[in-house]
């Protein structure tokens, strides 16, 4: 599980732990906590990119190792060919075997390099796809959370406005009632 996945779970926990507002279907959330988690997600996204770069570097290492192994195989084949040629009685056979060994070594080396390149390309492709999916998911979650926080703030302000209006109306009604009683008592 990546750090980004953990942070997204933390964000869901904050939303799950939100306390409900009485007489409303809305919930109160810790906005600072959500902002902190979103910032951590932003800071963590480059980590996913670093992992993809490490995979690319690993691919290059695999290719270099395959080339070295191929060179060693060719070098050994050439050494064996020279040894066979040195023997007078089997010179022709040695030359033929040396050519076969060199051809096989070249073919093996090419196959190893090709396999390493294919494997590295697959790893890089998968890592890139994963990094893009994580980034897109985090971006979508951030957008959703920001919309939810904005909606909550709007709803809270409307509720406060309604409550203030009702309170002022009640105060005016009580004041008018007191004035009426005072006027009657005079």
Image (cartoon, grey):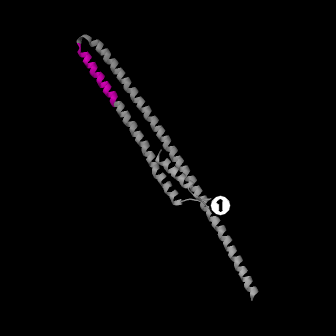
Residue 21 shown left or right of residue 136 in the figure:
right
Quadrant housing residue 29 = bottom right
Where 19 falls versus 66 (above or below)? below
Magenta stretch holds residue 115:
no
Residue at numbered disc 1: 24
Where 50 falls versus 165 (above or below)? above
Where 23 falls versus 47 (above or below)? below
Q: Main secondary structure of the magenta part?
A: helix
Q: Position of residue 63 (x, y in %)?
A: 38, 33
Span shown in magenta: 68-87
Of all residues, the one furthest to the bottom in this rendering is: 186
Q: Position of residue 108 (x, y in %)?
A: 38, 24
Q: Position of residue 91 (x, y in %)?
A: 26, 13
Residue 164 shown left or right of residue 118 in the figure:
right
**Which residue is drawn at the image coordinates 44% and 45% (left, top)?**
49
Quadrant housing residue 150 = bottom right
Magenta stretch holds residue 85:
yes
**Which residue is drawn at the image coordinates 55% and 50% (left, top)?**
141
Residue 5 shown left or right of residue 55 in the figure:
right
SS at circle 1: loop
Q: Position of residue 36 (x, y in %)?
A: 49, 57
**Which residue is drawn at the image coordinates 26% and 11% (left, top)?**
90
Quadrant housing residue 117 = top left
Which sits in the foreground, 76 or 156?
Answer: 156
């Amino acid at each position: 599980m990546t750090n980004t996945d953990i942070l997204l779970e933390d964000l869901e926990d904050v939303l799950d732990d939100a306390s409900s507002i009485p007489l409303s279907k809305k919930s109160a959330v810790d906005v600072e906590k959500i902002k902190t988690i979103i910032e951590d997600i932003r800071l963590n996204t480059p980590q996913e990119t670093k992992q993809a770069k490490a995979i690319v570097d690993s691919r290059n290492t695999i290719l270099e190792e395959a080339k070295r192994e191929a060179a060693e195989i060719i070098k050994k084949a050439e050494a064996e060919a020279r040894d066979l040629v040195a023997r007078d009685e089997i010179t022709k056979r040695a030359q033929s075997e040396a050519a076969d060994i060199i051809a096989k070594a070249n073919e093996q080396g090419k196959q190893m390099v090709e396999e390493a390149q294919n494997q590295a390309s697959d790893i890089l492709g998968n890592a890139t796809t994963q990094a893009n999916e994580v980034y897109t998911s985090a971006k979508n979650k951030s957008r959703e959370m920001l919309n939810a926080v904005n909606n909550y703030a709007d709803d809270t302000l409307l509720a406060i406005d309604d409550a203030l209006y009702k309170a002022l109306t009640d105060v005016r009604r009580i004041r008018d009632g007191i004035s009426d009683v005072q006027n009657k008592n005079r």
